[in-house]
Image: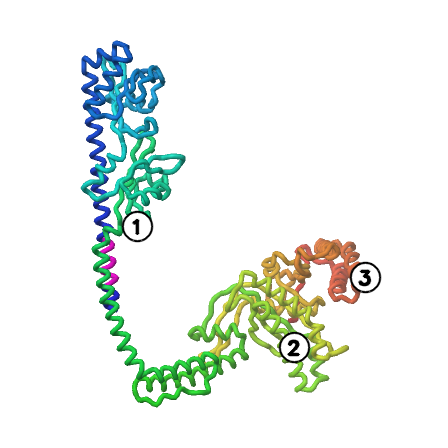
Amino acid sequence: MVQGVAFLAVNGASVRNARRQVDETLAFTADAFARSLEVRETILLEKARLLSSDFAFKEASATGEHATLLSVLQNHRERIAASVMMLASMGDDPRTEGCTLHPEDVGAAFPLPKLLAAAQDSEFGEASSIEFLDDRPHQLVVTPLFMPEPEKWIVLGFPVDEALARRQSEGTGTEVSLLRMEAGRWVPFASTLPEAAREGLGGRISPELGEAGQRVTLELAGLDYVTWVVPARSAGETRVAIALQRSLDEALAPYLRLRALLVGIFALGVLLSLVGGALLASRVTRPVASLVEGAARIEQGDYTRPVEVAQRDELGVLADSFNRMTVGLAERDRVRNLLGKVVSPVVAEELLSKEIELGGEERLVSVLFTDVRNFTSLSERTSPQELVSLLNTYLTRVSDIVEAHAGVVDKYIGDAVMAVFGAPLSHPDDALRAVRTAMAMAASVDAINDELGLEGDARVGMGVGVSTGVVVAGNMGSLTRLNYTVIGDSVNVASRLEGLTKQYGVAVIVGKSTRNACAEMAFRELDRVRVKGRTEALSIFEPWGVEAALDEAARAELQRWNEALGCFRARAWDRAEALFAEFEARDPGRPLHALYRGRIARCRAEPPGADWDGTTTWQEK
């Protein structure tokens, strides 16, 4: 480990040092290149200024004789070793009066109007830029020719070519590449790189790098080059860039030799460690193998066979501890299995995964209460043993439905079941899950009766109430005995709603908060009630199913019911009674229809006061 840490530290320091040296060399070369361009520009400006004040040059330019002017331009170009010399007229439409590259272009439009415009806008009437002539880059300067007023432009230039790149590369060991922008990509036109590396250079440099001047590492011909791209602007537009490059592999060569030595030392140390480890392992392999085999058995749930290690050293102590741990795990699983049968598996996991303490937290949950109808009558005609068996089968089926919808069975209260959706685990659609559970319970009654073999008057029914609200969920009880449950107003309301199913003759009743949380479900409003123990009125609803799945007949039935309920609350007794009579005629024997017809009769006999809003107060549970 020490050798590995040392190796990583030395290797990292070496790479950083090499990169720092490369960056410093590139920065030096970039400064040198910039100074070289400044020197060339200074030379060109000095020569151009001398020509601007040279009497003989003024005489030649004033003669208007093209041959004489071209001879003078060519003579001065050769004397200063320039690549091009030009003379252009001033004005809004500058014209070429002489050019050493194209002697025939007399009177033609000057090819570089932006360069002249830059000089025109400058303080001293001078400008410099890198421009392309005949598709070749030149470093150009422009100055006015005074006769004695400025009447013409003198343009001088040096080539920007391979020779320039090689001069800059000498002495620094830095590769220099000159790039030009073509069709949205950089293309090298001069470079000191090897031919194989030069071919892939242009495509690896994005146009943005040439604009910003950034360092990147490029892989060219199998070698990594640290590349510094320096933009060269041409009359405000970047068309030429200089790529300065150093081979990272060459810079790292001394450090690579040091790394090879460190690798050799490291390998030798590892070899010695392996030999020593093998000798030591020969003494501990058998007991360790026994421990591994025992761990595999425990992973498969087999706690019956202890690990047998006869040694009295540390491995022997470990084996003894392992065997004691096995006994503890067996006891833990036994407790977990028992706890999972006493409470919901989700609650069991909550109790086992956290430190048990009294108290709770506020949670938004949906509470479901369900109770068996006709259970008292069934108890009278069934023996206690048979009754327990029937009840266990019923509770098992109901609990399966709760858990299938990710709910938690909180407790069994005789033949009643309390379930919670939203604690200890919550879901975004807990209210919808509770309603679907209630509907699934109601739909399963016939199947449960058939499974229990109940017929005729012995068949049982079911009532389910669901309420949604904020409760306190947690461990309740004493320090020696506790129960994970929920406490709050929604629990009481759910119990009261379950009791109201008998009064209204429906299987499922939910509160308004539950209805509001189930946007995709269709509900029929049954009534506005005050349940026992509450002074606040509560709207109650019967779920009809998924809204989108209702057929036209069901939608019409629901609309007709809402009309009847509205007429009742608006005291339109005749219309309300007629509508409820229609419902009873189509579905005779339903307590709900008879209940409203009875209320209408009472309201006619004893008209309610002005503050009556149709709310019914129930005193029984």
Q: Nearer the viewer, residue 167 or 415?
A: 167
How many residues crowd mark 3 within 10 Å: few (<14), some (14–19), many (20+)?
A: few
Residue under circle 3?
Answer: 585
Residue shown at 32%/84% (left/top)? 315
Q: Nearer the viewer, residue 433 or 38?
A: 38
Query: Compared with residue 437, is residue 12 higher up or lower down, i.e. above or below?
Result: above
* x then y, percent, for residue 295: 42, 80
Residue under circle 1?
Answer: 223
Residue under circle 2?
Answer: 394
Q: Residue furthest top?
A: 63
The reply to whether the C-beta atoms of the residues labelled 1 and 3 are less than 8 Å apart is no
Residue shown at 53%/74% (left/top)? 345
* x then y, percent, for residue 313: 30, 87
Q: Nearer the viewer, residue 340 or 365?
A: 340
Residue 561 in view, yes or no: no
Q: Earlier in the sequence, mark 1 or mark 3?
A: 1
Region rendered in magenta: 7-16
Query: Compared with residue 260, is residue 116 higher up or lower down, i.e. above or below?
Result: above
Residue shown at 49%/83% (left/top)? 334
How many residues crowd mark 1 within 10 Å: few (<14), some (14–19), many (20+)?
A: some
Q: CA distance from mark 1 to mark 3?
A: 93 Å
Q: Main secondary structure of the magenta part?
A: helix
Residue 141: name its quadrant. Answer: top left
Q: Amino acid at mark 1?
A: Leu
Secondary structure at badge 2 equals helix
Q: Earlier in the sequence, mark 2 or mark 1?
A: 1
Q: Amino acid at mark 2?
A: Tyr
Q: CA distance from mark 3 to mark 2?
A: 34 Å
Query: Compared with residue 230, is residue 600 higher up or lower down, i.e. above or below?
Result: below
* x then y, percent, for residue 482: 48, 78
Residue 478 in view, yes or no: yes
